[in-house]
Amino acid sequence: MGEIRHRVVNAHPELELKVICETDPTKLTANQPFQVVREPEEVLKSDVDLIFVCTPNNHIPALSIEAMKLGKHVFAEKPPGRCLQDIEFMRQQEELSPKCKLMFGFNHRYHPGILKAKDLISTGRFGKTLWVRGIYGKSGGKNFRGSWRNNKDISGGGILLDQGIHMLDLFNYFCDDFEEVKCFASNKYWGFDLEDNAFVILNNKNGQSGMLHSSATLWKHKFKLEIGLEKGYMNIEGLLSKTASYGRETLTVGRQQFEDEAYAVGNPSEEITYFDRDLSWEIEVQNIVDCIKNNTPVMESSSVDAFKAMNIVEKAYKDSGLITEGEK
């Protein structure tokens, strides 16, 4: 993630990269136009305005909190730590540092298929959202076993926390807050002390429901978000990514049809839009730059959004038995 943020910051006309903390010197070439340090404390104490926290989950809360204590704006990767308490501590410091902006890397909100669906729904022509259903999964890969993401002390959770939280954030983006959470989780294949599959069912007080399958055993990578509406439906499938392993990103829009055209009952005509360019990384960075410049509140990918997504994850873990009520 640090490499992606590096690329975006370098290309941004209003940002100047001053210092990077990199523990692996092989990742950097000589004669860089910025300072390279080995300890994150050196970045925190440097004369910068905005800090990107691109670290494993266990370091995100402490570094973000310390940065805000020092008056720095913070853009932190998701998830916001290893447990709900981590984001609670970060939000407490955010309240104590009202001049600091805090944003999280929920970049899936800014993928073109998601943005287009959000715009269409906001017109009101499709009515209210009734339900959401998502599949998000990957196959692991040859280096999966050795990844820090599968070390509970570092990551705090398995595939649901690492990748599924993106889909949960999108559920929250299109629906009201979910209060009821049920989860079945397992680790039957990889054998970690973390889940490699999670099936999550959600419901809220307005009657909206959601269902997610988050998996590290999908041998064919898959991203699919289905949105059921009063007057139609929208499916976002595929995901523009560096590896292109999730397929081409598309938005399929169908309208409710069951009046005169019998052949259309259960088989409505559809409009499919194909997307070829992902600007999600650039859009989210521009958002925090605008908040800093204009001194406006962070309204998307905020600490509130991070808390809501993390709250669902924690409820899911508790319901599945992966953590107990007293465990953090």
Image (spheres, rainbow, N blue to C red):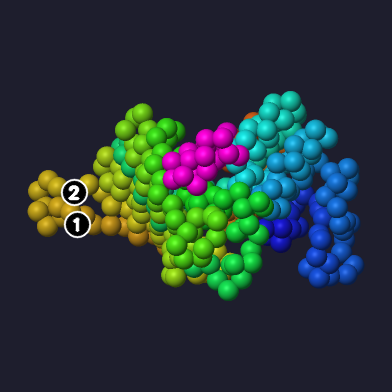
State the mark number for residue 257.
2
Q: The C terminus lies in which quarter of the figure?
A: top right
Task: Name which residue type carries label 1.
Answer: Asn
Rounded to the nearest angstrom, the CA distance separating label 2 from label 1 is: 8 Å
Q: What residue do we see at 68% from left, 33% from top?
A: 89
Furthest toward the bottom, the residue is 142
Quarter location, residue 9: bottom right
Q: Are marks 2 and 1 in contact (CB under 8 Å)?
A: no
Quarter location, residue 177: top left
Q: What residue do we see at 62% from left, 53% from top?
A: 152
Q: The N terminus lies in which quarter of the figure?
A: bottom right
Q: What residue do we see at 31% from left, 39% from top?
A: 130
Residue for badge 1: 267
**Where does the magenta region start and end?**
304-328
Q: Is residue 223 within the magenta segment? A: no
Q: Would you say 220 lies left or right of 258 here? A: right
Where residue 192 appears, as percent x and y from the top left, is: 55, 60
Q: What residue do we see at 65% from left, 38% from top?
A: 86
Quarter location, residue 305: top right
Indicate whether 76 appears above or below 97. Answer: below
